Amino acid sequence: MLIMNGAVHTMDGPVIESGYVAVSGSKITKVGPMEECPKSWEGEVIDAQGGHICPGFIDAHCHLGMFGDALGFESDDGNEETDPCTPHLRAIDAVNPLDRCFAEARAAGVTTVLTGPGSANPISGQFAALKTTGRWVDAMILRAPAAMKLALGENPKQVYHHRDETPVTRMATAAIIRENLRKAVEYGEKMDRAAQDEDTDPPDYDAKLEALLPVVRGELPVHIHAHRADDIATGVRIAREFHLKCVIVHGTEGHLIPELLVQAGVPVITGPALGDRSKPELVNMTLEAPAILQQAGVPVAICTDHPEVPIQYLPLCAALAVKGGMDPEAALAAITIRAAQIAGLDASLGSLTPGKEADLVVTRLHPLELMGQVRAVLVGGRRI
């Protein structure tokens, strides 16, 4: 396939004002200006007609397929509100790829998502990275697990306060996380000793600690739900204590402490920005947060937190960041290459680079333009 006559947003270099992208099979093979475009082409040709060509959009944090659209409890599978520590729960066992929101994601150019459990529990479970095309989730998976979800702040407090169970304070939420991370460290040490000494018995199998082992070994990042600045600081503190690979999700007050995040080297997945201040910890929500963080040197992605904001409005959320002062190409990066980097998927996704997967979006106007339209979407080189 050849996509031609469009402004090419490579995301790993400058915008090519009038260029082309060549695709062979599932991969991007060539990218360049129109004067270098092949004169003859045997495959399908898409004429962008002066529009824009960019990588498929990536939502780095959502719950797509976990909460059924327009359905009630029967399809609410995002929060296991019966145990504050559930690291062994896997998103792929709950995702319904036939939920119609997958089709809405594809139509809007969202080709990849990180989806998983909500924030009811201090340790919520395993996120998965998957494509938005398919009917069988196993065939859609890019990485599972992709992250371990932790949650701080009001959400765990609200859930367990109503049940008269721990945690009902921020102290208890952090303590539950620490306790189980420490147990995982000891579990791993016992396994290592048993592997080195045949006379030492390994510990009894524990599904929760098995799931936390790659976390405490630094192999699996933690995505920490945190809105308030003090909750963000707690997340960074715990990550330092256990040498975790850490990403802050939401980071609503991150713009108040950008120097902490820069010093800690912690990325932030911001959003959702399209909504009201529905709870106290959102009191300082502002459209300017992504711009402030990005300008301070914090790696920033933008998310919808679907269904909090419907998945198809991911480009709109990026556009709102521009309204808040973010450079348009930086905002586009926050839903393409920067999102891919934070998700650990940038080796194959996020930019129009030869050799990467051919996930592309062709739009009539700039990809973040409200009045624009998506003209074509490719996933793995196949037009969908």
Image: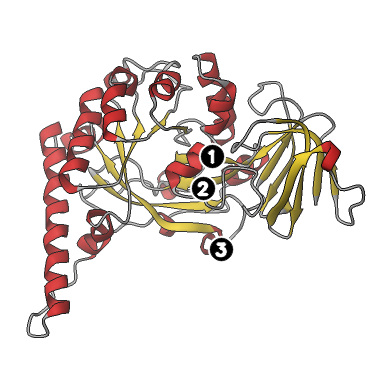
| Front-lying residue, 258 or 31 | 31
User: What residue is disc 3 on?
Assistant: 139
Disc 3 versus disc 2: distance between alpha carbons? 20 Å
Kind of residue at badge 2: Asp
Residue 143: x, y in percent? 46, 57
| Front-lying residue, 170 or 71 | 170
Identified at 17% across, 48% down, the residue is 242
Are circles 1 and 2 on residues that touch, CB within 8 Å? yes
Identified at 54% across, 41% down, the residue is 58
Disc 1 versus disc 2: distance between alpha carbons? 7 Å
Residue 300: x, y in percent? 43, 31
Kind of residue at badge 3: Ala
Identified at 40% across, 48% down, the residue is 116
Give the class, few, some or many, for how many residues have Cα within 10 Å of label 3's Cα (few <14, many ≥20). Answer: few
Q: Is residue 63 visible?
A: no
Sequence-wise, the earlier of marks 1 and 3 is: 3
User: What residue is disc 2 on?
Assistant: 346
Secondary structure beneath disc 1?
helix
Disc 1 versus disc 3: distance between alpha carbons? 23 Å
Secondary structure beneath disc 3?
helix
Secondary structure beneath disc 2?
loop
User: What residue is disc 1 on?
Assistant: 337
Identified at 11% across, 49% down, the residue is 179
Which residue of the protein is positioned furthest toward the left in this rendering? 199
Q: Is residue 28 visible?
A: yes
Q: Is residue 141 above or below residue 123?
A: below
Sequence-wise, the earlier of marks 1 and 2 is: 1
| Front-lying residue, 303 or 275 | 303
